Amino acid sequence: MKQIIKYRLARFAQDQSGATLVELAILIPTLLLLVMGAIEFGRFGYNEAMAQKATELAARTAAVRPAVCDDVPETFGPVTDTTGEPPRFGTLCRAGNVCATPGSGEFTCTLAESNASADEIWQTIAPLLPRGLERGNIQMRYTHDDRLGFLGGPYTPIVTAELVQFDFQFITPLGLLANLATFGDDSAIANTIRFPNMSASLPGEDLGQGPGL
């Protein structure tokens, strides 16, 4: 009887018939993580390229439309601290001490503003943006530049469209797969990643109802 028990124990110790299944169970999460990771980061790169195109399109549209932000002036006004004869209307701002700087020289807001320009820009770029990105993630900035425009002419600042503060959502459970592949390390991969901020700038043309694109 002892011989039989020893024989069966020895045979059991040498039996590797289930080893492949165990190894496969260990490797599957890692393989899936690599495959899904390649898909997700390829998707991330595509969305990044399309979002950059969207910011360029937003800046181009904003450059020929009334300002999205409040209080942006419509025309270049004269400086008030001139000495001697005041500059004549039509004088180029780059001549120096000609055109007044409105406010702080910069106006910032987002496409969450409720006006025709904000609505048009959003409708133009929304199909190019990642899923889940909202109007508040697109910031518009109008920056005064003394090299542009002329006294009494349409106000033409530098117009900047910027994508900010957006978390890109993976559609596959990378966090869960990473957790399995690393044997329970919850900090391995989150299921979101911060999308890079990106911007595009153009000199304003007339901030009016021009022909657009």
Image: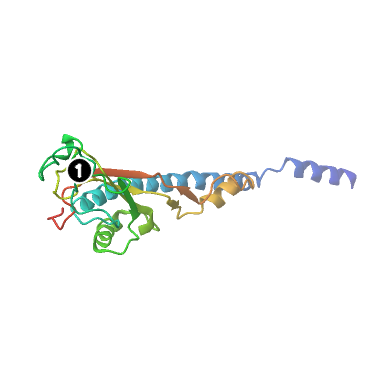
Q: Nearer the viewer, residue 22 or 188?
A: 188
Direction top: furthest residue: 95
Q: Nearer the viewer, residue 200 or 182?
A: 200
Q: Which residue is mark 1?
A: 99
Direction front: furthest residue: 84
Residue 24 showing in the rendered view: no
Residue 131 drawn at (x, y percent): 38, 57
Q: Nearer the viewer, residue 209 or 1?
A: 209
CA neighbours of label 1 inside 10 A, class few (<14), some (14 to 19), many (20+): many
> In the displayed structure, does residue 173 sit left or right of residue 96?
right
Query: Residue at coordinates 31% horizontally, 46% vertically from top-left?
Result: 106
Direction right: furthest residue: 2
- In the structure shown, which secondary structural element does the residue marked by tag 1 occupy? loop
Q: Nearer the viewer, residue 144 or 29?
A: 144
> Which quadrant holds residue 2?
top right
Query: Residue at coordinates 68% horizontally, 43% vertically from top-left?
Result: 16
> In the displayed structure, does residue 23 sit left or right of residue 34?
right
> In the displayed structure, does residue 32 sit left or right of residue 182?
left
> Which quadrant holds residue 114?
bottom left
Name the kind of residue labelled 1 in the image.
Cys
Residue 149 drawn at (x, y percent): 16, 43
